[in-house]
Structures are given as structure tokens and as C-alpha cells.
Amino acid sequence: MSHLIAPSILAADFTNLQRECEMLEQSDADWFHIDVMDGVFVPNISFGMPVIKAIKKHSTKPFDVHLMIIEPEKYINDFKNVGADILTVHYEVCNHLHRTIQEIHSAGMKAGVALNPHTNVSVLEDIIQDVDLVCLMSVNPGFGGQSFIENTYNKVTKLKQIITAKNSKALIEIDGGVTDANARKLLDCGADVLVAGSFVFKSTNPINTIKQLKSV
Ligand code: DX5
Ligand code: ZN
């Protein structure tokens, strides 16, 4: 499978969200990456259900919703109802991660788990067969435009070994500080999905930038 590109709309122009959606629709982007922040789990607040529902009207590509919120299990059906296709929760906030994954699947979505930069990938050994996606945070969650943490390469390599050993189908997604300077190396280590916010939306030609990331 060739790798997937998931531009993060956190870096989009919010006064022109419809236009940004149309741009992504025309581009080589595979998914929309949608960052929900609660100001509790992370020191920032982004947007929630009404915004996701609005942009769903202007898009056909899968919605990869990254929840940076505490108690994500309370909102599984709400995110399904506004258009989430993949729902990712943080390992660090789930006391009953296995149950939360089951509930995301029962609601009819793919289930992802995100790990903060300090969380060792080995914590996923007993859940990796049940998840569709692992989102490795390559910055501390909460803000776009931060610089990539180099230790991520080691984490991707280790996680890939776990996935192969356990015969899991989980995709490895990298989130934070992704650019043309680290994309190739991440893919060589085993990454499947690259999230990119600032690198795409702050570039002069986002369509070309997405194409560039797609063809590294
Ligand atoms: C960070 C978010 C990321 C962010 C990526 O908390 O989860 O998805 O939007 O933005 P860049 O690519 O600018 O680091
Ligand atoms: Zn994200």
C-alpha cells in the first residue's frame, strides 16, 4: 500500500473553511485530519462537533478525528453522528482502552490510539490486534507548527516490529512537524499515514505540497 496523506485542518483558514475543504477534495489528500482539543488534556481549545458537521457537507474523503480530550468515551456516538470515520483517542486518558475501542467499532468507525511523545509504544502490545490505527505524536499535542521530535523514528521502528510480530493490521500515523525533510525517513521506518498541518496550509501552493508529500 502506498502511504496516505492526512492534512490537518487545524492549520486551515477558518474564515474560508469551505474553500479549504474544496481544495483538499481536489488534492491528492487521502483523509481529512481533524484535531479536537478540550483545554484540559492539552493546553489549547480548537473546535468541536458543529464545525466537523459543517465541513462534512463539503467533503467526501474520510474524516480522521483525533480527540485530544479527557473522557473521550462520552462522545463516541456524537462524533459518529457528525461524520467521523476514524476516531482516535489518547492512550493517556483511557483507563479502559479495550472497552473504548470496542465502543468505537460498535458505533461503526475505525478505532485509533494516539501516544504522546513520552509514552512507550510497548504499552500497546496487548491491544494492537484490536486497533486500526496508532497515531504517534511527533510533537507534544496541543498546537500546530511545532518542530518534529527526532526520537519518533525509533518509536516507529519499534512499533512496526510489534505490529508485525502480532500480525496486526494497524496503520502507523505520524502527527506533528511533518515536512518534506522527515517524510521519507518516517516511511522507511514503517509509517503509513503522514499528518501535515502547517507544512501544507502555510505553503504557497497547498495542492502541490500535498502532491509532494504523496510522492516522496
Ligand atoms: C497537534 C495536532 C496536529 C497538528 C499538526 O496537537 O494533533 O495534528 O495539527 O500540525 P503541524 O503539522 O503544523 O505540526
Ligand atoms: Zn492531530
Image: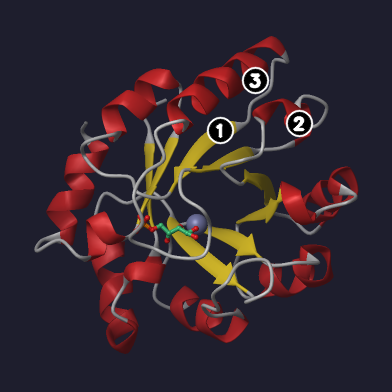
Q: Is mark 1 within 8 Å of ligand 2?
A: no
Which quadrant would the C terminus be assigned to in this image? Answer: top left
From the top left corner, tell me how far across and down residue 158 is, in percent. Answer: 58, 19
**Residue tagged 1:** 171
Q: Is the residue marked by circle 3 packed among few (<14), some (14-19), or many (20+) residues within 10 Å?
A: some
* Residue 26 visible to the viewer: no
Hey, which quadrant is residue 184 in on the image?
top left
Q: Is mark 3 within 8 Å of ligand 2?
A: no
SS type, badge 1: strand
* CA separation in Å, label 1 and label 3: 9 Å
Vertical side of 153 occupied by 36: above or below: below
Of the two numbered discs 2 and 3 on the same chain, state the one appearing first in sequence: 2
Vertical side of 185 occupied by 179: above or below: below
SS type, badge 3: helix
Of the two numbered discs 1 and 3 on the same chain, state the one appearing first in sequence: 3
Q: Nearer the viewer, residue 112 or 147?
A: 147
Determine the residue positioned at 77% across, 24% down: 125
Q: Amino acid at mark 2?
A: Val
Determine whether label 1 and label 2 are within 8 Å by CB. Answer: no
* CA separation in Å, label 2 and label 3: 12 Å
Hey, which quadrant is residue 3 in on the image?
top left
Determine the residue positioned at 28% across, 61% down: 198
Q: Is the residue marked by circle 1 packed among few (<14), some (14-19), or many (20+) residues within 10 Å?
A: many
Q: What's the mark number on residue 123? A: 2
* Residue 24 visible to the viewer: yes
Q: Amino acid at mark 1?
A: Leu
From the top left corner, tell me how far across and down residue 181 is, in percent. Answer: 21, 36
Q: Amino acid at mark 3?
A: Ile
Vertical side of 14 occupied by 180: above or below: above
Q: What's the mark number on residue 163? A: 3
